[in-house]
Image (spheres, helix red, strand yellow):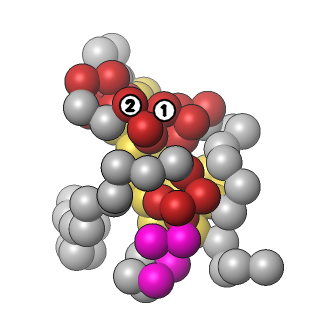
Amino acid sequence: YWAGGEQIWAPKEPPPRVIAFARREGADYIVVDSDSVFQHEPHMRPFLNGPNPPEGVKLAHWIDRKDRVVYIYRVEDSQ
């Protein structure tokens, strides 16, 4: 939504299912805010590995703030 895109909430599922959902919905990116993960979305914790994300996404950018990190992952085409 910051970049003018549509925001779609990910299902509370393991990373492979979140990535499959993103592909079905036509999402180009998955944005993960560490603050939200720790407070409300523990199922997204594997996405907090930055340069070592779950299979199917690639780290495109990150924003490091004092109180949180926001990771932006590019959804890769399915193999």
Count residues near mark 1 (Cα–Cα under 10 Å), then give few for <14, some for 14-19, many for 20+. some
Query: Is 47 placed above or below 64 here?
Result: below
Q: Quadrant of residue 57?
A: bottom right
Count residues near mark 2 (Cα–Cα under 10 Å), then give few for <14, some for 14-19, many for 20+. some
Q: Which residue of the protein is positioned furthest toward the right in this rendering?
A: 79
Q: Quadrant of residue 2?
A: bottom left
Residue 23 counted in the magenta span = yes
Q: Which residue corresponds to the image point at 26% horizontal and 74% vertical from the top-left?
A: 5
Q: Which residue of the protein is positioned furthest toward the front in this rendering?
A: 13
Q: Amino acid at mark 1?
A: Arg
Q: Which residue corresponds to the image point at 45% horizontal and 71% vertical from the top-left?
A: 21
Tell me the element at label 1.
Answer: helix
Asked whether residue 63 appears in the rendered view, the answer is no
Query: Is 20 placed above or below 54 here?
Result: below
Q: Which residue of the protein is positioned furthest toward the top in this rendering?
A: 66
Query: Is 67 placed above or below 76 here?
Result: above
Q: How many marks?
A: 2
Q: Do residues under tags 2 and 1 come within 8 Å of each other at their CB atoms?
A: yes
Q: In the rendering, at what x and y percent does residue 20 appear?
A: 54, 71
Q: Which dot marks residue 42?
A: 2
Give the extent of the magenta segment. 20-24
To which residue does mark 1 refer? 45
